Image (cartoon, rainbow, N blue to C red):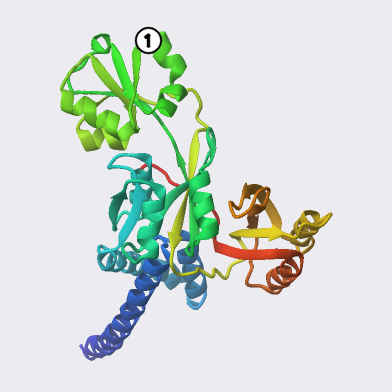
Amino acid sequence: MDKLNEARKIIDRVDGEMAKLFCERMRAVGMVAEAKRELGLQIFDPIREKEVVLKNSARVEDEDLKSYYVDYLNSNMAISRAYQSRLLEGMKVAYSGVNGAFGHIAATRIFPDARAVAYPDFLAAYDAVESGECDCAVLPIENSYAGDVTQVVDRAFEGSLYVNGIYDLEIVQNLLAVPGTAMSDIKEVISHPQALSQCANYLREKGFKTTAATNTAIAASRVAESGRHDVAAVASLETARLYGLQVMEKHINESSNNTTRFAVFSRVENKPNGEENQFVMFFTVKHEAGSLGKAVSVIGENGFNLRCLKSRPTKNANWEYYFYVEGEGNLSGESGQKMLRELKENCSFLKIAGAFDREKLLKEE
């Protein structure tokens, strides 16, 4: 009995110390949540969590206890995520469009615990973050079919916000109708012109009449409100759930490579420490022979991979262009700082628009 009492005393003492440390840890978790709100970062960071588990589990030398300690750490992570979610429930994320549109889907997949706020266009959503009305904005920058979303890229060049993440959303189109509809009932299909174009062969083979709508979500809303069985919409599965529509057929778009890249814009700059980073920058070069080539060479010579280089008119003067750059590597390191110094010498203007962990695919929940 003495041995049992002694063990219980030790456990009570350790539990008391752990309670104090738990509160201290959770206060730090609250600081993490606030930083993620400011930076427009996701709560779940699998790379960081893996690093924490590996680092801390290495401190346990007893191999019999190590697996239990890993379980303990993973439980701690889950508790931390739950607390962050509660703290970030008031976070406001701006997007362009309406409920069920792909901008809304991207915003809610990236920030499932935040409040998604709709704006009529890209610029209004961007400006809402600059003014402090929202914490961050989720806006498209490129589509694999339609190319660059130039309005957003231009605003990123001119504006004050930082890009703190890029996420890929596969655009999957589905045929939706009111519940109880049979395929033979459908005569007309409504959707955004681009969505209709992506499904053109399928719609033609079925012999459906097509009608354009402002976007896919509005098309779905119109079908739901009509209650008609002879009209259907082309839209996402999320939109079907939102408007109570029946999925007649899934994935009717011809190509499975239709993806939109969404950027998260925030007022605060993110500074990731790892080597597996990406960055976005803008620059202009002097009107001298070879100036663009020198700038591009500086990036490669310092060991950074240039993912893309695109030019856009500055709109300040005729035939004056800025360059949009995406690259891979850590700008905070010695080679990154050296590259930036050399770029400043070769460029008439240089702006680091953001650095972030590697691009992520947004999977359907």
How many numbered discs sit on the rendered protein? Answer: 1
- Judging depth in this view, the residue of 13 and 223 nearest the camera is 223
Could you tell me residue 50's position as x and y percent?
A: 48, 64
Residue annotated with mark 1: 206
Residue at the image point whose x is 46% and y is 68% from the top: 53
Could you tell me residue 322's position as x and y percent?
A: 64, 54
* Numbered disc 1: secondary structure: helix
Write down the quadrant of residue 128 in the picture.
bottom left
- Judging depth in this view, the residue of 318 and 251 nearest the camera is 318
Image position of 201 (left or right of 83): right
Could you tell me residue 203's position as x and y percent?
A: 40, 15
Write down the quadrant of residue 298 in the picture.
bottom right
**Residue type of the residue flagged with mark 1:** Lys
Above-or-below relation of 110 to 62: above
Quarter holding the N terminus is bottom left
Q: Residues within 10 Å of mark 1 (few under 14, many from 20)?
A: few
Could you tell me residue 242's position as x and y percent?
A: 23, 38
Image position of 219 (left or right of 151): left
